[in-house]
Amino acid sequence: MKPGKKYTSAELQYLQLLARQYPTIQAASTEIINLQAILNLPKGTEHFISDIHGEYEAFQHILNSCSGEVKEKLDELYGTSLSRRDRNELATLIYYPEEKLALVEDETEDLDEWYRITLHRLIDLCRLVSAKYTRSKVRRCLPKDYELIIDELIHIRYEEAHKRDYFENIIDTIINIGQAANVIEAISEVIKQLAVDHLHIVGDIFDRGPRADIVMDSILDYHSVDVQWGNHDILWMGAASGSRTLVATVLSNSIHYNNLEVIETGYGISLRPLSIFANEVYKDCDTHCFNVKLTNADGGQYTEKDKLLSARMYKAITIILFKLEGQKLIRRPEFGMPDRLLLDKINYENKTITIGNTTYPLEDCDFPTIDPANPYELTPEESKVITQLTTSFRRSEKLQKHIRFLYSKGGLYKIYNGNLLFHGCIPMAEDGSLLSFTIGGQKRTGKEFLDYAEVSCRKAYYDKPGSEERQFGLDFMWWLWAGRNSPIFGRDRMTTFERRFIKDESSWTEPKNAYYTLYNDPKICDMILDEFGLHGTHCHIINGHVPVKAKKGESPIKGGGKLIVIDGGFCKAYQPTSGIAGYTLIYNSRNIRIVSHQPFEGRQDAIHNNHDIANDSVVFEHMESRVNVAKTDQGQELKAQVDDLMKLLAAYRSGAVKEDHKE
């Protein structure tokens, strides 16, 4: 007889803890069988979206449609039995069940018949999208109020005569007791949840568009999601963490793009302190360089008085911003950006500024709060205003909830199922080597620097208020936003000052990091993937941040298929540059496909006219065989659980751990 395995005290302690969850051989065996079955199921579909920029209607539509996944399933199921018009109608119902049901109920004569037909179709579709999941996982997706009903309907074998009557009786009862609309809404939500197993947001939820807070609410409610922080996300995270500089930046950007609804309505932050200050201090100032950007749609809503107040507020907060940035650069020489100290380079007598070796005439030199002898010092009034505004950002309950979510679900990069996701770039030198940074007193490159940067961002929010670690984290978040070759900014400089005050556009240039040229080389992409421990045919870099200029023939697929740029292009301000509304990515068990989108005409147009976002889907990589869960990150975790349970079985059988048969 073989002697039993000898266990260390740590091993035995772990197995005894595991035995609390699986107290018998039967319980452990059942779980092993269950996990092995899951490992052989097809991997779930991943959905990648980037650069949403507050365009909540377009984002929610793409989220609802799963970038065409819902339509594809409808075509698969009903392509030969329903007209395109009927399939479009059904798709819109799934996207917007509550609103679409209200229209149907007003327009349909025999509503009970419509309910019956629609319930049959939705149940068939739900059955199709649930086929690659375990029944237990499908149950977890079902709403509690209708869990048993929907579970029964999608698993009944309708082709069996005795089951058919049972099925139809359930449908009749749902309709007769007035629950059809509620059940339709519930099934629609289940279909969308099962169509996409996991959502990746590859940066830039905030700025430019109208309501980033509504986008955040949608993400908070999503069943499975991660976020890679973009430069505009870091900006808002830093502002919410208490950085006065980044609060000033958020407000300067928002006023410039006439995008204050998200601040005042979305997050309940009052701008009254700034408006009072600006109207008093800048009432007699030249503000022609600070005209707010208005579209044709909203230009008529504002009086000249409104526009003047906006310009004064914009100028007031921008001057505060330039002062605070200067203080930061002086305080942090390790950022290596003394050339961006500009306020002390102004010649007020000649109305010029010298940047580098070039002297430029200034369009505006009317700065009532700047002391030429001490240009980076805030006046007492400026200090009071920016402190009040920063306190409002810190006290906004909704903003803090959203920022905590970004910290808990996000990071600067993500490695997931063989893909490397990040928003900006991996900073590189012209020769293709990784750029090194000595910020923080130690030389770091590549993954090591990104790991350091992420920890610093977390300290800015979580470390003790007033501590040096927290203050450094806040300063570092500003560097990530605008620092030279920052991984999420990816440029040599941010020329905000030049764009406001210098007419010569040659001074506006913001040279991109070498990464954005080198990433066309497959060898460079392989080198980056290797830096993050990824190897293999189906490993990719999935990248946001820079809009793809599709109208000029630029492709989102770089590096011989190793890198995919999915700047969503949701923001209307960027669409003239890109020519489209950007890209999303779908990775399922059979292939990876990129989806290009045309601009969204609006939620009401979609609901009333069944108009979807026009898109083109291109499969650029097929899997040699269908990818199952065993080949995913989740699969590795499940295999480890199986290994542990096998050890528990052995311990039970050897007597090292006792079973607990409860009576």
Image (tube, rainbow, N blue to C red):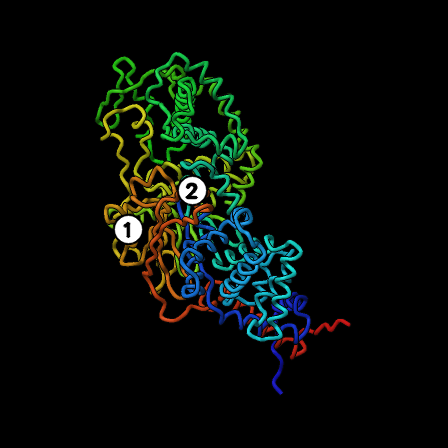
3D distance between C-alphas at marks 2 and 1: 45 Å
The C terminus sits in image quarter: bottom right
* Callout 2 crowding tier (Cα within 10 Å): few <14, some 14–19, many ≥20: some
Kindly tell me whether residue 441 is visible in this rendering: no
Classify 10 Å Cα crowding around label 1: few (below 14), some (14-19), many (20 and above). Answer: some
Q: Residue furthest right?
A: 663
Residue plotted at (75% across, 71% down):
662
Could you tell me the amino acid type at mark 2? Gly
Q: Position of residue 275 (x, y in %)?
A: 47, 20
Closer to the chain start, of discs 2 and 1, is 1
Residue extending farthest bottom:
1
Q: Quadrant for residue 592, please give it.
A: bottom left
> 606 or 455, which lies in front?
606
In front: 310, or 347?
A: 310
- Of the residues shown, which amino acid type is indicated by label 1? Ser
What's the residue at 30%, 30% (across, down)?
Answer: 339
- Marker disc for residue 602: 2
Above or below, 108 relative to 349: below
- Number of numbered discs present? 2
Task: Please provide percent x and percent y for residue 1.
Answer: 62, 88
Image coordinates for residue 597, horizontal then vertical, percent: 35, 49
| Front of the two marks 2 and 1 | 2
Q: Is residue 79 visible?
A: yes
Mark 2: secondary structure = loop
Is 280 placed above or below 173 here? above
- Helix, strand, or loop for circle 1? loop
Q: Which of the two residues, 68 or 286, is positioned nearer the viewer here?
A: 68
- In this view, the residue farthest toward the front is 109
| Whole-percent x, y for residue 414 in the image | 43, 53
* Disc on res. 433: 1
Q: CB under 8 Å between callouts 2 and 1? A: no
